[in-house]
Amino acid sequence: MNDDALIRIAEALERIAPAPLRAPDFDDADAYIWHVAPDRLQPVAEVNRVEIDLLVGITRSRDTLLDNTVQFARGLPANNALLWGARGMGKSSLVKAVHAAVHQQGLRLKLVEVHREDLPSIGRLLTHLRAAREHRFVLFCDDLSFSHDDQHYKSLKAVLDGGVEGRPANVLFYATSNRRHLMPRDMIENERSTAINPSEAVEEKVSLSDRFGLWLGFHPCSQEDYLAMIRGYCVAYGVEISDADLRAEAIEWQATRGARSGRVAWQYFTDLAGRRGVTL
């Protein structure tokens, strides 16, 4: 058998049974992205985030999540958190901003992003993070939700409950979702109407959210909060505009979008900064 054939066989075997993950040196970065096929933790050199003080209109959620995260970073008990509610109101931005704020307090904490479609591999990731006892990790899953016949939600229980072994003491799980119960409402209603034991069928779907110790709700912002967000960005990045012009332009911008949120506020500010020649 020639060398080319041996190489092809070795590559095929590697695809079928990839080599075990070699955990990175966790001192090299503060954030990672979990990938599968093959399993690997990709370091993130610079996290895309905004300063926590620029997140307006979510004071209670901000303070609650920050306190919970600081407790965890200090080795104290803390809860998994579900950030749910209106689109574009800063749920994922808050997780990343809190991570940065914890570091500013001199506490070490690693942020690991996990994609929803990779949840079935979460058990393997937990095994590796459990071994890195000297570090503490927040697993972060953005825009988490489950559709009809989606069984990925069962994999999530390994993170929230941990099975027989229990969740690693150095791992916490934060998720964001537009849905409070992570499942489509019509899916839950269908379970109620078709199941032999409706309450039991619904319980399995709804109880997943109950496994999060913290539920932080995000709701559509008021017009004054919307304008305050934009003014905060202007101050932070040195963009000058009068209150009257900002109000008129920002309200017109939200009208064209048919929505008012933190995301829309940032999109308007990005346009404003570009017109004023300011680099973000």
Image (tube, helix red, strand yellow):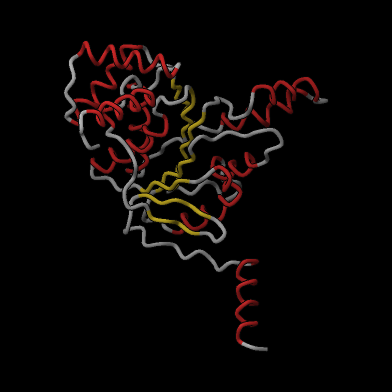
Measuring 75% from the left and 21% from the top, which residue is drawn there? Answer: 192
Whole-percent x, y for residue 200 in the image: 73, 27
Comparing 9 with 177, the one in front is 9
Whole-percent x, y for residue 156 in the image: 58, 42
Measuring 79% from the left and 25% from the top, which residue is drawn there? Answer: 197
**The C terminus lies in which quarter of the figure?**
top left
Q: Which of the 4 image quadrants contains residue 48?
A: top left
Whole-percent x, y for residue 66 in the image: 33, 32
Whole-percent x, y for residue 268 in the image: 33, 24
Q: Is residue 37 visible?
A: yes
Q: Which of the 4 image quadrants contains residue 242?
A: top left
**The N terminus lies in which quarter of the figure?**
bottom right
Classify residue 139 as left or right of residue 47: right
Q: Is residue 70 visible?
A: no
Measuring 71% from the left and 20% from the top, which residue is drawn there? Answer: 189
Classify residue 212 as left or right of residue 150: left
**Does residue 151 lie above or below 202 as drawn?**
below
Classify residue 264 as left or right of residue 15: left
Q: How many marks?
A: 0
Measuring 61% from the left and 44% from the top, which residue is drawn there? Answer: 155
Q: Residue furthest right?
A: 196
